[in-house]
Image: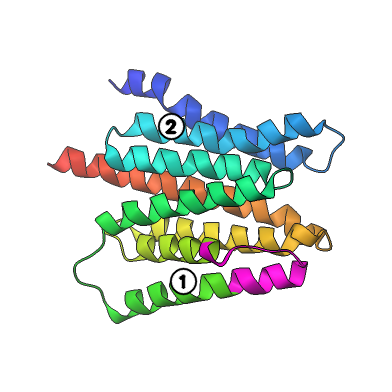
Amino acid sequence: MPKRALIERRPWLLGSMVLALAWIWLQGSETPGLYLLLLKAAPLLLLAVYTALRHRGNDTRSLAGMLVLQGIGSALMDYMPLIALNALLVAYLIGLGMFLVHRRVEMDGGRKASALALTLGTPLLCYFAAERAGVGVPLFLGLALGGMAAAAWISTFPRSRVGLGASLIVAGNVLGIAAMGGSLPAVALAAWPLFYLGNLVLATGVTGELRMRDDIF
């Protein structure tokens, strides 16, 4: 079984990370735009395949759907922003629903405060970033993103991985919006790596926790 798992799952995760590094290296190069578009989507698409194989269930199907839509949304942002923003909106609504299913019954004050800050702070950060860049970003996107991150933070999944991953996704999105005007090249370089790293940490955290629960029960 371990050998089969290695063959079926880990190559998808490794391929995702390799292609993510390739895109970071090649962004801004003279590589044709279509190839960069596909390369930008591929790491999250492969990560979605990994999650679907790592654990079979409704939660990981939802997670895989969220990853696929994020991959499509991030890749199309420079070419079809309306489609991209709607793909991201649906992705975060799927993530919000998934994490709410696993919300904690009892929460300490710190967890509640962090969830509230993410819920209210994320749309505000998205708004100010969009204002700074001179672009329009739907309020619902910031609300869905903040809601997803807050739900991840108060879920039964480990904060050190899933909560952190969701927070990194928020940071990557906010920086990506701020860089849309083209006046902040350094911010643009940092946005997508943070976005991908957040998804990587979140996805491996969710699937690892679900597998551990299956082993226990």
Q: State the mark number for residue 50.
A: 2
Q: Residue at x 73, y 43 (%)?
A: 79
Relative image position of residue 142 (x, y in whole percent): 54, 65
Is residue 133 shown in magenta?
Answer: yes
Identify the image's colour scheme: rainbow, by chain, secondary structure or one colour: rainbow
Q: Quadrant of residue 19?
A: top right
Q: State the mark number for residue 162.
A: none
Q: Residue at x 47, y 50 (%)?
A: 90
Q: From the viewer's perspective, tell me whether residue 146 is left or right of residue 20.
A: left
Q: Quadrant of residue 39?
A: top right
Relative image position of residue 180 (x, y in whole percent): 75, 58
Residue situated in front as seen by the camera: 35 or 191: 35
Q: Residue at x 79, y 61 (%)?
A: 181
Label 1: which residue?
A: 118
Q: Which residues are magenta?
A: 125-140
Residue situated in front as seen by the camera: 208 or 185: 185
